[in-house]
């Protein structure tokens, strides 16, 4: 969990230019972290590369918060 | 080894402008939303009685006015379009009819946004092989006629225009250096306009004859595919990105172009686009970007340019050329 969250957090901080402290599990990409739909697509692509997995469009649509992303990745591994 | 090069260019866009402010009145959107996600400020829209062949003819007239030679010996007309006036006859035949060149072949190419680069690739092949001498490669689209103006995610994107390039035999100073192609038919359902059949890859099609796009999937495909193919194309020609003067990707969306450039060693400042004032004009976007750069004095003779058309199919063609005029 800690390792996944750490790697996900780093990607979010780099991509969205947000403060690491704001990347909480309950933080919404769009509402809290200022991402628009295309930022989310880029994030999904970076998560796919980082964790060597494919995230389908249907699944990606359900990933709204940092916690959603972490849970999704852990369930796939 | 190529024996062909591009020797003339012409473009045309209808005078009617559809601005972001106009779109705010039609769908729930805003200038800020559109600019941030697409880089688009306005598009051109053909009037009710103006169709793709009309736009193509205007683009050829524009080319003719800027070309010193004659077009009477054109021996092939290739028109890249997804919005032909008729299912058939082809738009190329309508262009032939207008200019009256009787000894020319004429056919349309259906390769969506990759149509222009496919057309140039074919023209190079036909001329280099010795089968043809002078080919008009035209791209024309009236996408506004197949855009669903109730769908706020796609209706902000598309515009109408046409452009033409002349390709001629030149054994001494050929302009075509290398090309790459690729196709992913399994992505046929993420960008389409339905015809006779109502399913593809097991997916039920919608849209009632209008374009349908899953923007996220198309974005992902392009951002994943183009950077690697950009490198492969340069490698095929034995060049590096330092040798390249301009990169002209299909002007689908500025954010997508930024994403592609971020994944290549090439700076976005050296891309040529037409997205800001014309929107996404499918097969036309690359020739519009080239002509804007010619008129701005940016694109000069003997510069090395990488053109990359990609779109519905899914399919793409990238070309490395030496600008010949």
Image (spheres, rainbow, N blue to C red):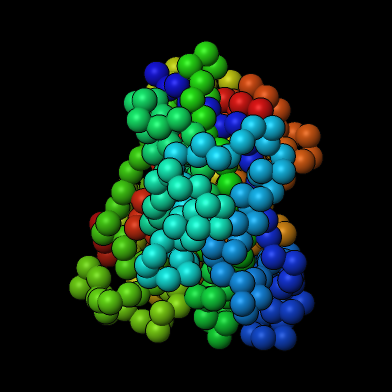
Does B213 sit left or right of B157 as displayed?
A: left
Give the answer, above or below, for where A37 lies relative to B320.
below
Total of numbered circles in the picture?
0
Which quarter of the figure has residue B12? bottom right
> Which residue lies at the image location 64% right of the left edge and 21% below the top edge?
B302
Can you give x and y, in whole percent of width and height, for residue B86 in the image? 43, 71
Which quarter of the figure has residue B290? top right
Can you give x and y, in whole percent of width and height, for residue B167 in the image? 52, 34
Give the answer, above or below, for where B236 lies relative to B45.
above
> Which residue lies at the image location 50% right of the left edge and 39% below the top edge?
B74
> Which residue lies at the image location 49% right of the left edge and 53% below the top edge?
B96
Residue A30 visible within the image: no
Q: Nearer the viewer, residue B136 or B205?
A: B136
> Which residue lies at the image location 39% right of the left edge and 18% below the top edge?
B1
Residue B209 visible within the image: yes
Does B282 sit left or right of A71 as displayed?
A: right
Q: Nearer the viewer, residue B273 or A19?
A: B273
Which quarter of the figure has residue A28? bottom right
């Amino acid at each position: 969990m800690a390792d996944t969250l750490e790697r996900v957090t780093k990607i979010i901080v780099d991509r969205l230019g947000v403060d690491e402290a704001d990347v909480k599990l309950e933080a919404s990409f769009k509402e809290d972290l200022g991402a628009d739909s295309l930022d989310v697509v880029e994030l999904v692509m970076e998560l796919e590369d980082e964790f060597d997995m494919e995230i389908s469009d249907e699944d990606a649509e359900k990933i709204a918060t940092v916690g959603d992303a972490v849970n999704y990745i852990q369930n796939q591994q | 080894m190529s024996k062909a090069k591009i020797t003339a260019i012409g473009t045309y866009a209808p005078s009617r402008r559809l601005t972001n402010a106009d779109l705010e009145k039609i769908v729930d959107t805003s200038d800020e939303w559109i600019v941030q996600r697409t880089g688009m400020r306005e598009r051109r829209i053909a009037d009710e009685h103006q169709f793709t062949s009309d736009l193509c003819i205007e683009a050829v007239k524009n080319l003719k006015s800027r070309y010193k030679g004659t077009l009477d010996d054109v021996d092939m007309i290739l028109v890249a379009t997804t919005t032909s006036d008729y299912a058939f006859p082809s738009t190329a035949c309508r262009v032939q009819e207008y200019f009256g060149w009787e000894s020319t072949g004429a056919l349309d190419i259906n390769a969506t946004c990759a149509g222009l680069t496919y057309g140039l690739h074919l023209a190079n092949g036909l001329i280099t092989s010795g089968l043809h001498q002078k080919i008009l490669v035209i791209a024309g689209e009236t996408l506004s006629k197949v855009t669903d103006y109730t769908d706020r995610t796609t209706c902000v994107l598309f515009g109408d225009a046409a452009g033409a390039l002349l390709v001629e035999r030149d054994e001494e100073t050929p302009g075509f250096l290398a090309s790459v192609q690729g196709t992913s038919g399994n992505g046929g359902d993420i960008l389409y306009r339905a015809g006779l059949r109502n399913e593809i890859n097991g997916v039920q099609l919608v849209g009632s004859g209008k374009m349908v796009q899953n923007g996220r999937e198309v974005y992902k495909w392009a951002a994943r595919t183009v950077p690697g193919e950009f490198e492969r194309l340069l490698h095929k020609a034995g060049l590096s990105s330092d040798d390249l003067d301009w990169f002209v990707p299909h002007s689908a969306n500025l954010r997508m172009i930024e994403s592609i450039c971020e994944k290549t060693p090439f700076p976005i400042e050296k891309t040529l686009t037409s997205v800001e004032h014309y929107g996404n004009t499918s097969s036309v976007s690359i020739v519009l970007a080239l002509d804007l750069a010619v008129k701005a004095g940016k694109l000069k003779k003997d510069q090395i340019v990488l053109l990359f058309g990609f779109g519905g199919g899914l399919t793409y063609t990238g070309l490395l050329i030496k600008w010949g005029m």
